[in-house]
């Protein structure tokens, strides 16, 4: 019984994909990009996220792509929040790479201080969103907690830096 249900769901998903995808007629990268952005703007984000993207990316997409949230948020604020979230996540990637490469204690501390500053800035901008986005706020709070925990690990001597 579940096999038929899954089969029916798969057929339905394929039909939706056929409706969404259309032959790309542009030859330049700019044309291709604009056509893809136009096509993806009409897709429900919850259906797109079935791939292998990370949880953080899913939270950002689900939180910032909601039509009801976009009505109340100015474009500048939304752009600022997405840029800050991207910077924050890139900072964490840089920090983890630096730990693997053998960064000094001082360097790790400075990177964590930078991460904390990015987190505070992002939390300040999240307060301006109406209606509030609890998923995104939760993610930013967890990233803030991670920075505090990492600083505690450095102080405690958990890392041989």
Image: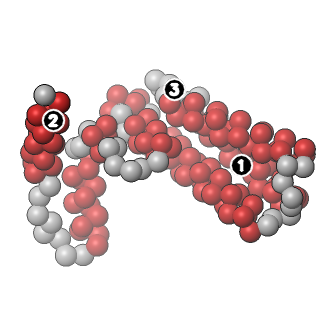
* CA distance for labels 3 and 2: 36 Å
Q: Position of residue 139 (x, y in %)?
A: 57, 36
Q: Quadrant of residue 150?
A: top right
Q: Is residue 101 left or right of residue 76?
A: right
* CA distance for labels 1 and 2: 47 Å
Q: Nearer the viewer, mark 1 or mark 2?
A: 2
Q: Nearer the viewer, mark 3 or mark 2?
A: 2
Q: Position of residue 83 (x, y in %)?
A: 53, 51
Give the number of marks: 3
* CA distance for labels 1 and 3: 21 Å
Q: Name the image quarter holding the N terminus.
A: top left
User: Marks 2 and 3: in contact by CB < 8 Å?
Assistant: no
Q: Name the image quarter holding the C terminus.
A: bottom right
The mark that comes first in sequence, 1 or 3, is 1
Q: Nearer the viewer, residue 52 or 63?
A: 52
The mark that comes first in sequence, 3 or 2, is 2
Q: Is residue 8 left or right of residue 94?
A: left
Q: In the displayed structure, would residue 77 be above or below residue 34?
A: above
For the residue labelled by badge 3, is the local secondary structure a helix, a strand or a loop? helix
Task: State the residue lying farthest toward the bottom.
Answer: 27
Q: In the displayed structure, would residue 92 be above or below residue 122?
A: below
Residue position marked by numbered label 3 in the rendering: 134
For the residue labelled by badge 1, is the local secondary structure a helix, a strand or a loop? helix
Q: Residue at x 71, y 36 (%)?
A: 145
Q: Is residue 23 visible?
A: yes
Question: Is disc 1 surrounded by few (<14), some (14 to 19) or many (20+) residues within 10 Å?
Answer: many
Q: In the displayed structure, would residue 73 be above or below residue 49?
A: above
Q: Position of residue 28 (x, y in %)?
A: 24, 75
The mark that comes first in sequence, 1 or 2, is 2
Residue position marked by numbered label 1 in the rendering: 115
Q: Residue at x 32, y 44 (%)?
A: 50
**In the drawing, what numbered circle is on residue 3?**
2
């Amino acid at each position: 019984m579940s096999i038929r249900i899954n089969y029916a769901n798969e057929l339905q998903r394929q039909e939706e994909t056929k409706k969404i995808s259309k032959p790309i007629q542009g030859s330049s990268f700019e044309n291709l990009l604009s056509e893809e952005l136009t096509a993806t703007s009409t897709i429900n984000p919850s259906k797109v996220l079935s791939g292998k993207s990370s949880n953080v990316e899913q939270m950002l997409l689900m939180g910032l792509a909601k039509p009801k949230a976009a009505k109340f948020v100015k474009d500048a604020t939304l752009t600022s929040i997405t840029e800050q979230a991207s910077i924050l996540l890139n900072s964490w990637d840089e920090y983890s790479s630096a730990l693997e490469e053998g960064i000094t204690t001082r360097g790790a501390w400075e990177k964590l201080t930078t991460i904390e500053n990015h987190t505070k800035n992002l939390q300040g901008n999240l307060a301006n969103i109406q209606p509030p986005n609890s998923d995104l706020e939760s993610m930013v709070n967890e990233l803030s907690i991670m920075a505090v925990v990492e600083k505690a690990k450095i102080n405690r001597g958990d890392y041989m830096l």
